[in-house]
Each structure stands twice: as C-alpha cells, then as structure tokens.
Amino acid sequence: MIRGFTLRFPGYEPAHRLTLRILVEENYHPRDIVRCLERINKIGCLRPEYNAVYGVKEFELSHYKKALPLLEKARELPPHLLEEWGYRPWTIQSCLQACRSKVGLNSLNSSGPDASGVRKSAKAGAVSKEKAGQPAKARAEKKGNPGRIKRQKAKHADRIPEQKPSDTEIKGIDAVLVKEKPKIVLSAAVGSPAELHERFAAGNVSGISKYFLAQQASRISQADHFDSLICLNTLKDIEQYNYQVETVRKVMRSFRGRVLLADEVGLGKTIEAGMVLKEYMLRGMVKKALILTPPALVSQWCEELSSKFGIAPVSTENGELRQDPEGFWKVNDLIVASLALARNKRNRPLLGSIRFDLVIVDEAHHVKNDGTAGWMLVNELKSRFLLLLSATPVENNLMDLFSLVTLLKPGQLGTKTSFRRSFVLRGDPTQPRNRERLRELVGEVMIRNTRAIADIKLPARHASTVLVEGEPAERELYAKLTDLVREGFQSNVSRLALGLLLQEAGSSPRAVRKTLLKMAGHSDLDDNMKSRMTRLAKLCEYVPNTSKTARLLDLLKISKSKVLVFSRFSATLEEIAQRLSESGIGFSMFHGQMSAADKDRAVCAFQDGTDVMLCSEIGGEGRNLQFCSTMVNFDLPWNPMKIEQRIGRIHRIGQTRPVHVYNLCSADTAEHHILEVLDRRINMFELVIGEMDLVLGQTKSEKEFEDRILDIYGESKNEQDITEAFDRLGDELLAAREQYAKIKRLDSEIFANDYEI
C-alpha cells in the first residue's frame, strides 16, 4: 500500500513526506526506502534533509559511490533536521568515513590486483601448466593451426613453466585480502549514564556497521513478541476480556500502532487504548504521548490512567499550561489535553513543532471534518503511533470515514474525488458501493468489536428521582442565592465561583456558607457584594439540617442492601456523617484527602461490615464495588458524564444484580430543572454508559453542558425565564438523541460485523 500510495500521489508533498516517515520509522527494508526517495527525486521534491535518509540507506545497501555525495550534502545539515529523521551528526560522519574508505579501496583495486585477480592468476597458471603438459602438436591441432607449433617452441624455448599455487598459499592470499568477519555479540543492558560516558570517553564503542546490524537484530528479535503482552500483569482492577487483549495484540502486530478503534459504546475503548499505551511504554517504544479528549472527559482519562494503569499524566486542567504554555507541552511526557484547548491558535503551532511517540484521540468523530481546526491539528501532529477512538465513525456520510482514515494512512482510500466515485452511492452519501473493496481497505486501519462478539451482558438499571420539598428557610436561602448569582453576572464576580454557589445550593447550606465566607474575603469585590455574602453566610447557620438529609435517612433505613452515597462537596459529606452518627447508622468514608491505606480500609469496611459508604466525586475510583447495587446521588453534577461515571462505579462488568439509582433533588432548583431535561425528556438513565456524550455531541452548541446551565441563570431575569430556557434546552437534547439514534443505525448498517477481531 505504501508503494502504491507513493505512485498515486507523487506531487503531494505532505503525503510523500508522511510516506517516507512511515517507511523509515517502521523499519522497512532500505531498498523500499531508496525506491521511494528515487520517486520523490524524480518529481523534484527531494528536500535537503532527505539526503540524510537517502545516503544512509544507500550505505546500508553497500551502494557506496551513490551514498558518498548524498552523505556529503547531509553533513552540512543542521543537527535538528538530522534529529527529525533519527540521526545524529556523528552518525552521518561515521557513514561518510566508511564510504570514503570503501570507495578509495575500490579505486585502488581497480588499478591493481585484488583477491579475485590473484585467484584468476592462480587459475591461469594452473591452466597454463595443464597446457604445458600437452604435446605442442596436439595443442596446435586443437586450435586448427598446425603451423604454429614450431613458432611457439622457438618463442618460448627458455620460458619457465608457471607453477600452480598450493591450497595453503591460496588460503593465505584470501586471509590477507579478505578479512575474516568478526563475530558480533548482541546484548541488552541497562546501566547508569555515568557508565555510558565512561565507555565513550575510553573509545569503547562499536562501528556504525555493527550498530545497524544490532538494530536489525533487535527488530527481528521483537517481531513476534507482541503475541505475549507484558502489560497484563501490571494492570489494576481491570477485568481482562479476550476481545480486548486480542484487539491490543492486533493493534501492535498488524496495524503497527495506527488504527481506528470503533468498538460499540460500553465495550472499553479507553481500556484498550490504555493497554496499548502501557505496553508501548513498558517496551520502551513510547516515552512522550498526547491524549486528546472532549473537555468533559479530561479528568476521567486522568483517573483511569492513574488508578488502572499506574500512569500519572498531567492535564490541561492544571495551572501549569497558563503559566508556561510552551514549557507545558514540551517538558511533560504524558499529557491529557482538551481537544478544544489544544486546537486553539496559541497551542496548535506549539503542538505541531513537537514530536510525540503516541497520540490518542478520544471521541474522534469530533475531528471527522478535514476542514476543521481539530482535524488539521491531528494531521499536523508528528507521531509514530496514532489511535483514533470512536463508536460512531460515520455521523453524517461516508466522507466522515474518509477523513478519519486519511489521518491514519493518507491515500488509503484515494483522493476525495476518487473515493466518492468508487465507494459512495450517487444520490445517497450514506450508502457505500463496492462494499467488498471498501471493507478490505477499511479493514486495514479499523477494528470494531460488537456486543455480540464480546458477549457482555449487564443487569438492568433503574433510576428514580426523589423530589424533596424544602422548608421555608431553605427556599428563602435558595431564592436569595439565585438573586445574588444573577447580579454577580453583572459585576466582576468570578463566573466559576457563581456556578459553584448554585451547585452548592442544591447540596447543603453548610457547603454554601463555606464558599460565601471565602468569597467575601476577596479584596476585588465591592462592599455591597461583600455585605450581602456575609449576611447570606449567616442565614446558612439557621438551616443546619436540610429536608434532603432527612429524606436520605429515610431511604437508608428501609434499604435492604448496601448503599453508596455520592456528594461532590466535603462540607456536605461532613453534615451527612454527623446525621448518620446521631441516627446510629454505621458508615465508612471515601474521599480524595485520604491516604491509599485509609481508602483500602474504607472499602473493606464497606464490603464486610457497614451498609453505607459516603463518597466524594472521586469516590471508589479504580475500585471493584460491584458488591453494592444501590446508589444515591445526594447532589447532582451539572456535567452528565460525571453522573455516568458515578453510576459506572457499580453498574459495570461483573455486576450480577439489578442496579438502583436514586437522585435526590430539591424542588425548583437547578438540579430539578437538569433532571427534568436529562431524565424525563431524553431518558438519560436508559442509555449505555458513554452514550450521553455522543448525544450531547449532536447539539449545535460548542459550549459544555454546565456552561449552558450557568448561561441560563446569568441571562434570565426571573424563574419564568429559567423554566422556558430549560424547556428549549430539553427540545434541543431530544432532537440530539433522535439524531444519535439515526447515526447508531447508520454505523451498524455500514460496518455490521465486518471489522471484529
């Protein structure tokens, strides 16, 4: 395919550059690389830095005269251009010296006898001796010239017959002119940098030819090793399924690390990608990696990598990126980044200048259009390995598939024009033609596992909304907080802080009070705003026990199974813990401030003793909590994916009982409106975990869901405006769910079961 691609697109500079890079990095035979360079040179597109590759590969093929002028040119290149292709100045210099030596030796040999010449002389002597033993007359008769006999006798009467050298003499000549090839012992060792410096200082290094030979031997020795994955024993709390293990093997062995993982939702594309990353890291094949995700999934990726794979990434959610953008991208080896942030005008050029070993793009359907900043960012990234993850690679039409495949393997599906002509049914761009050929081509870059082959069945999930009518004091507090937030939008109060206040208002007065006091201490607020915040904080003290807490106690008392209770805020968890203790209900706590040992003890206590565990937002991360089948959302995240993450703690592979989810919410609050939209309008809790993000992806807005909620409160003048705005949001999400259902059917029709492992 690489060769055909080069022939079909000889004038497309980025394409032939990528082709050459793939050939070099995938260790194709030097002959194939030289052929590619010859074609590039023929069309006049041979860039100066290509001379380094050209010269080294000709050298490896023993074409020393061809390699010499190319290496001469490569020697003049700046180091950074050489490093881009994996070479160092000393590498080029060593090849150049070897070439000069070889070419000089050949010139000398052309003007004097060489080993073959000596052998020819020896053979000639043997023939002459044999002929000398024949009668002159017989030789003359054999040549058809009897008259030559006397002349030859007269001419060579005093000639000494040539002696045939012995076998020992011939071996001696060979030993002098043809040096015995040394035996090369290949070994792999890990030592300190100091030891390496000492070896270099002492000159204890091998020649360039031995280096190339060792490199080839290493490549050969690893050829079949992907059959046995070394990462499997390092994974934590991951149920390993055969289809996932086989997918990882196939990605590394057959797809050479560049693939579209299009498993159906809920089958663990994230786990498969994490296994590929871990395997490459353990083998020393990946050091610097970039993971691009929708903003809402950044924290989830960080959590999964940390808890399941023992990998500690940095993310674009910390402050380091704002302080030093260039240093953030270049210094950190493993980054989880928001795609929206990475593709902006400030970060995109920085990322394009960095070389990554592996790039993972989650929810890759967000980069399906080749004219968008997201697609162009991924296309510009320099990476040996590329994983695209999407359960719906075709959302609008088959050109979506073309764009994604082109990122992985440019030219695999031809040009846009040829693709439309060959594979898209005229009049219906969602329907393919030449299905067999398209299946063959796409099958070289895509794996799609279905639930049928995975044979994964989860028990039923039931969700209930528990609406709580607050006491008059609670309703008064919420109304005043809403007014404060609305006015805060018109002043210089932090938008993030205002959103936090609204979310805490749906959780507990204790959480609200803590934030209000902190905000009132900021010097950049006017005196009027500070005074209002202080008065509201005082009002919170008069609502110590909420109606929601009382309702939770009622649920726990009648529950016959273990219950997992989630709250985002530590102050709320403290209030719940206090009420549980007063009521004599045993419980354990799990939150981010606990040590690893304390977390282990909390989970063990929950499994073997207590019937209730109170969890913060990160509660139970990476833990097997399938022994619990009931959970309560004491407060509700505004991000639907975080709601899914909570549910996924217990409704996961390995769960054997039906799962019950209770969502507590106070009437006429933001939580109430959100649940009306997510539960009543689009039946979010009936979706497979992971599908909600795909539904939200079908909305026209580029804003995150929680930002849209905050906009509603900032732009509304009264409760009526808020209700109408949420109704419009519900209509939009309902249309988005219907569109997602249509896309899901389309992908099933196009791909069926043709791309399973």
Image (spheres, rainbow, N blue to C red):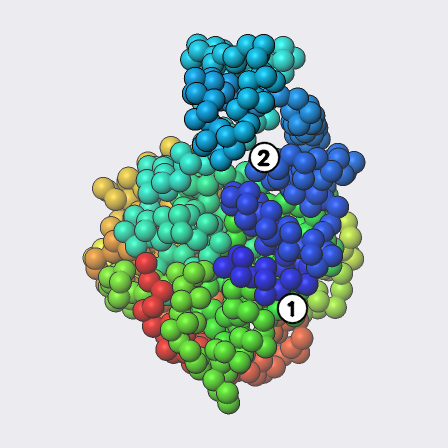
User: Where residue 266 sits in the image (x, y, percent)?
Assistant: 36, 62
Tell me whether circle 1 and circle 2 mark residues in contact (CB < 8 Å).
no
- Given residues 619 and 540, the one toward you in this image is 619
Give the residue displayed 56% in from the left and 55% down from the top.
Answer: 292
Residue kind at label 1, given as amino acid type: Thr
Give the residue displayed 59% in from the left and 59% down from the top.
Answer: 6
Residue designated by label 1: 372
Q: Which mark is residue 62?
A: 2
Q: Is label 1 or label 2 in front? A: 2
What secondary structure is found at the residue carrying circle 1? loop
Give the residue displayed 43% in from the left and 17% down from the top.
Answer: 133
Q: Is 591 left, or right, of 317 in this rendering?
A: left
What secondary structure is found at the residue carrying circle 2? loop
User: Where residue 632 sits in the image (x, y, percent)?
Assistant: 35, 59
User: Where residue 39 sits in the image (x, y, percent)?
Assistant: 64, 55
Query: Is residue 400 at least partly visible in the picture?
Result: yes
User: Where residue 603 sits in the image (x, y, percent)?
Assistant: 32, 42
Question: With respect to residue 454, does 138 lie above or below?
Answer: above
Question: With respect to residue 586, does 466 lie above or below?
Answer: below
Q: Upstream in the sequence, badge 1 or badge 2?
A: 2
Question: With respect to residue 206, does 271 lie above or below?
Answer: below
- Given residues 663 and 407, the one toward you in this image is 407
Query: Is residue 681 at least partly visible in the picture?
Result: no
Residue count near mark 2 (Cα–Cα under 10 Å), binned few <14, some 14–19, many ≥20: few
Residue kind at label 2, given as amino acid type: Ser
Give the residue displayed 69% in from the left and 25% down from the top.
Answer: 111
Q: In which quadrant of the rendered image does the C terminus lie?
A: bottom left
